[in-house]
Image: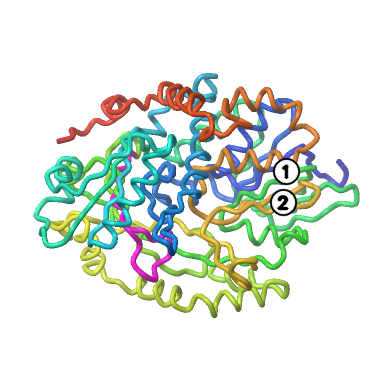
Amino acid sequence: MSNGQTGSDVILIGAGIMSATLGAMLKELAPNWKITVLEKLPSAGEESSNEWNNAGTGHAALCELNYTVEKPDGSIDISKAISINEQFQDSMQFWSYLVESKLIRNPQDFIMALPHMSLVHGQKDVSFLKKRYEALSANPLFQGMEYTEDPAKLKEWIPLIMKNRSANEPIAATKVDAGTDVNFGALTRMLFEHLKKNGVEIKYKHKVDDIKRTRGGAWELKVRADNGRVERHAAKFVFIGGGGGSLHLLQKTGIPEGKHIGGFPVSGLFMSCNNPDVIARHHAKVYGKAKVGAPPMSVPHLDTRFIDNKKSLLFGPFAGFSPKFLKTGSMLDLITSVKPHNLVTMMAAGAKNMSLTKYLIQQVMLSKEQRMEELREFVPDAKSEDWDLVVAGQRVQVIKDTAAGGKGTLQFGTEVVTAADGSVAALLGASPGASTAVSVMLNVIKKCFPQQIQAWEPKLKEMIPSYGASLLKNPELLRDVQASTAQSLGLSPGQSFQKAVSQPVS
């Protein structure tokens, strides 16, 4: 490479779960390729992938009510739930492959078996949950789902939530024991450790300032190291996986696919329990229903978490607003993301989402006691002194023009923007994000490496046995995949929990 450039086959921007996943997959598919990772922070998984910055729910649509929508005729549309569940199965298969191949060890350090539950109050929501249960439990992907309206059964399932609860309104819940808690921060760090051992160059404290096309068709990156030194890096393929920072870098590429796209930042807060007795009385992820006018990412949930092999209990999220696109970002991020090509899109989104903006401002203004009142809807006798406030990660929701929603439509999900020639791809958006990383990166690989995909197919099938097949249409394959991933990842109910948690559970 000329002009002091460092040349690579692949550059991954951002050391989060997405780059870690793509790097780990490409290392298996093309072991001789030179891969370089550029990360502006001092270590891996410090932003959205960090265990304190996301809910750690292995999003498989087992408990998240916003993935199943009630249609005008009263029936329940479960198509999104099916799609997300199948994507999570891809992640489980790839993680199993990594464990079985001894590329990563000790799966209990990043994944634990944990029941996933949905909980609703009031006749209208109880009738919705029952219909949802009937639609999902008949589907092979959701077998084993239980439903109850019986207070005695609920006391057995969720003693902390049912204690001292007044019995003046209908209440119902569903439970799936095959849910998981995933520590995406730990998984990200394990994957980067594996990549480093296998010759991938990982440059921390290296911020990408600019990205431009060279005459030869490669991409040249201007990178600033922590000491102020400027480096030039070039590659045939660049993946922009910098979380909220991806939008600015995508705009710098100048690719037409990156135009007319904006970002809307949403910040989050959680309550974290500091009382071991309270933590021990709850063992599930329990998702409720978002309040009217609240965005899907602020669905309230009370979560058992396993962080550093210790049981924790979190409640949230409380949404908020900050113009930063990353926790470590700049207050100017939102303003500087507005360009002539996305101005109309952004203005349309602003006009359409006045109620959301008002909701976020109200959330920012909540006092601790007001947050405790929301928690008490889940845990009636929650005491303020048992709970601390924790700042979660920043999420940047994608804004784009769509056929269905028109100009400036806010997208609640994960999006990949790819150049027509496949030489650059950027990951934008939020939940279910990390849980579907393997499926999302499979799509990046298919779009960006069409010449290699056929030759790679046998290896892809080894890494993800259901590759190219529908688990929904192959119940036998689904059973095999679920049995083998549970075995590899130590997820038989109770087994991993007893193994890794030192705290007693009552």
Quadrant position of the N terminus in the picture: top right
Question: Residue drawn at (49%, 35%), measured in percent from left and top?
Answer: 89
334 sits to left or right of 138: right
Coloration of the structure image: rainbow
At mark 1, the secondary structure is: helix
**Residue type indicated by callout 2:** Thr
Question: Which of the pair 293/108 is nearer the observer?
Answer: 293
Q: Which mark is residue 447?
A: 1
At mark 2, the secondary structure is: strand
**Residue type indicated by callout 1:** Lys
Residue 500 lies, with reference to residue 58, above or below; the image says: above
**Which span is picked out in magenta?**
288-306
Q: Which mark is residue 290?
A: none
Assess whether residue 356 is covered by the magenta stretch: no
Say whether residue 291 is visible.
yes
Q: Position of residue 205 (x, y in %)?
A: 60, 48
Quadrant position of the C terminus in the picture: top left
Q: Position of residue 79 (x, y in %)?
A: 50, 49
Q: Which residue is mark 2?
A: 418
Question: Which of the pair 66/380 is nearer the observer?
Answer: 66
